[in-house]
Amino acid sequence: MLSYDNPVSINGQPPASPTNITTNRLAMVSSKPVRSSKIADRTMNGNTAKTPELQLRPAHHHVWLVTGPAGCGKTTVAQYVANKLDLPYIEGDDFHPAENVAKMASGQPLTDADRWDWLTRLREEALTQVAAGHDGVVVTCSALKRKYRDVIRVAKYFSPDLQLHFIYLDAPEAVLQERVANRKGHYMGASMVHSQLAVLEPPMPDEHDCICVDVTPAPETVCEEALSRVVSKLASDL
């Protein structure tokens, strides 16, 4: 079981000491004043609710990782949430090394070894964005296995002020295959969907930092459901 209070090894290697990360980063995260996030005229279940502007002043910095296999809509949901909450957005695919992209483009599934550095880079970029003065950040990351999510969870070891959340987008294989097949200009082919589902470990009940969203409805409905769940979490941290 991952503990945020003790160093955690990753792929047989202990995590770096916080002093080796960035002293300034930790100071900025702990001392930065909290800004307010604003959401107005939100739409719930297709009905526009003309509500007063919602002012959220969370007590912590929040990192939102939008996860799931290819075709589930990670980019669409993440960009929507980031835009509504005025948070920076990190596209996880952009952090894959060229070797990983080449493998996936040729239909070869990535191994655990292929993913460790990628996951670490994403974790570091999320911490960097928070240290730069943002209240939080939205990140796309497949995070197919629990141990991949655990790599990201180590961020709390470096910055206990963080609250991490995984928004898992769930859909049957047929839906994912169709969406990937219709996607243009992306290196991930439809053949990769099956291989990803073969190793997928959906969040378990004891992973309390995970939110599950059904993505079979229309994209706008899915985006609003995800936003609603995020706002609910933020409201509980006022």
Image (spheres, rainbow, N blue to C red):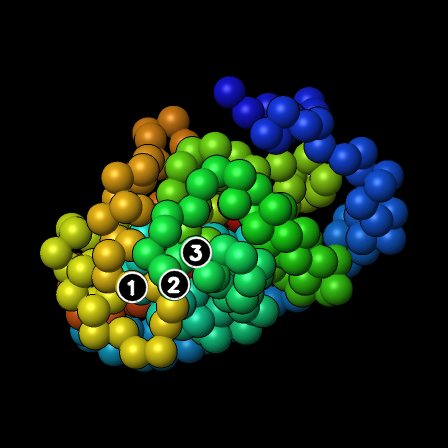
Mark 3 highlights which residue? 103
Task: Give residue 179's position: percent from left, percent from top.
Answer: 21, 67
**Do the CB atoms of the residues marked 1 and 2 lie less than 8 Å apart?**
yes
The spot of residue 219 in percent (x, y) is: 24, 70
Number of numbered labels in the structure image: 3
SS of the residue under disc 1? loop
Q: Which residue is mark 2?
A: 105
In this rendered view, identify the residue nearer to me: 26 or 143.
143
Q: Position of residue 113 (x, y in %)?
A: 53, 39
Towards the viewer: 232 or 186? 186
Q: Using the numbered discs, state the Cα–Cα distance from disc 1 to disc 2 in whole angstroms.
A: 7 Å
Occupied quadrant, residue 58: bottom right
Q: Which residue is mark 1?
A: 189
> Would you call the spot at circle 3 few (<14 residues within 10 Å), some (14-19), or many (20 or more)?
some
Residue at x 24% of width, y 57% of height: 191
Which amino acid lies under the numbered mark 3 shown in the image of this protein?
Lys
Q: Amino acid at mark 2?
A: Ala
For residue 80, say whether it is visible: yes
Name the residue type under label 1: Gly
The answer to which image quadrant residue 35 occupies is: bottom right
Question: Is there any visible trace of residue 228 in the rendered image?
Answer: no
Q: Is residue 8 above or below residue 208?
A: above
> Residue at image x 27%, y 74%?
183
Q: Is residue 155 left or right of residue 171?
A: right
Where 55 sits versus 154, above or below?
below
| Discs 3/1, front | 3
Q: Residues within 10 Å of mark 2 (few under 14, many from 20)?
A: some
